[in-house]
Amino acid sequence: MQKSFSHKPNNFRQPKKLGWGLRFLILGVLALPILIWNGRREQQFPSEKNPFGYLPQLAMSGGDPYVRALMRTISASESNAEEPYVLLYGGDHFHNFNQHPNVCVKIARGPNRRKCSTAAGRYQFLASTWLEKARKYHPHPHGSTGLSIYSFEPKYQDKVTYKWLKDRRIWGTDIAFLLRQGRVDEVLKMLSGTWTSLGYGIEDNWVTPHLAKIYQQVLAEELLRVQSSGDRDR
């Protein structure tokens, strides 16, 4: 039977135990990269998603915050996507902003089934509607031999829509004034003949019932933008 020894050789030294302070310091250094990565991850992937989908800012700068909020509300139901400015009817995308893409996409369902739609961009302008409104409101048409071409760049989609909504003669009322009075539903009803997903038209979708709440959310953002930047109506 092998003998066991209860003592250690005289030249054997036990390693010194690390103090609690040093242990915490080492653990902190090791955990720092993980904490940084988690922080970046939370910024890129928020824990709570917006229940209304993605509500991007406008490409244009300036403008009445109440009308800007209305524009974002319209696009929430018409083009609820991360890149609404490049959206074709049906969900495909275009990549040339030189002018309205004028691609007629077949309508698969709804009251206009079997027809086709040229709706494009953040506000789903039909090609004919864009040409009509751009002639009146586009700030920088270009072209040659007397033929004007109207850039469909995101900021111009915004600017044409903004000036259209601000035109009292077209709507027979001051939309910005109505919005300031809190008459959002009245404005949406007025515009539903143009944008048919606004709750009183023929093409409601899952976003439509939430438009009043969406408007209040984006209006708060737009008012904060004005306060923080000193931006004014243009």
Image (spheres, rainbow, N blue to C red):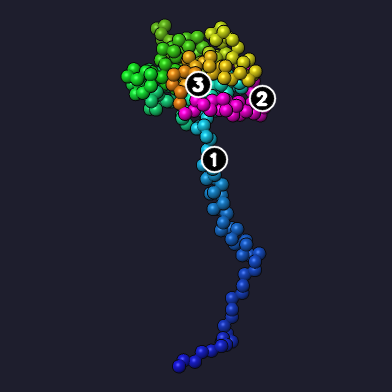
Residue 118: quarter of image:
top left
Quarter that holds the N terminus: bottom left
Across the whole image, how many numbered discs are drawn on residues?
Answer: 3
Identify the residue at image location x=57%, y=51%. Answer: 35
> Magenta span has 231?
yes
> Magenta span has 189?
no
Amino acid at dot 3: Gly
* Residue 73 spot, x, y in % from top left: 53, 24
Label 3: element kind:
loop
Amino acid at dot 1: Glu
Residue that numbered label 1 is attached to: 48
Give the left or right position of residue 11, taking residue 113 as reference.
right
Badge 2: few (under 14), some or many (20 or more) residues near its Cα, within 10 Å?
A: few
Give the left or right position of residue 26, taking residue 199 as reference.
right
Specify the label residue 199 is tagged with. Answer: 3
Residue that numbered label 2 is attached to: 230
Pick whichever of labels 1 and 2 is earlier in the sequence.
Answer: 1
Numbered range of the magenta stretch = 206-234
* Residue 231 spot, x, y in % from top left: 64, 23
**Disc 3 to disc 2, C-alpha distance:** 34 Å
Badge 1: few (under 14), some or many (20 or more) residues near its Cα, within 10 Å?
A: few
Identify the residue at image location x=62%, y=62%. Answer: 24
Quarter that holds the C terminus: top right
Q: Nearer the viewer, mark 3 or mark 2?
A: 3
Residue 30: quarter of image:
bottom right
Q: Nearer the viewer, mark 3 or mark 1?
A: 3
* Residue 9 spot, x, y in % from top left: 56, 87
* Residue 130 spot, x, y in % from top left: 44, 14
Label 2: element kind:
loop
Q: Nearer the viewer, mark 1 or mark 2?
A: 1
Give the left or right position of residue 73, taking residue 94 as reference.
right
**Disc 3 to disc 1, C-alpha distance:** 27 Å
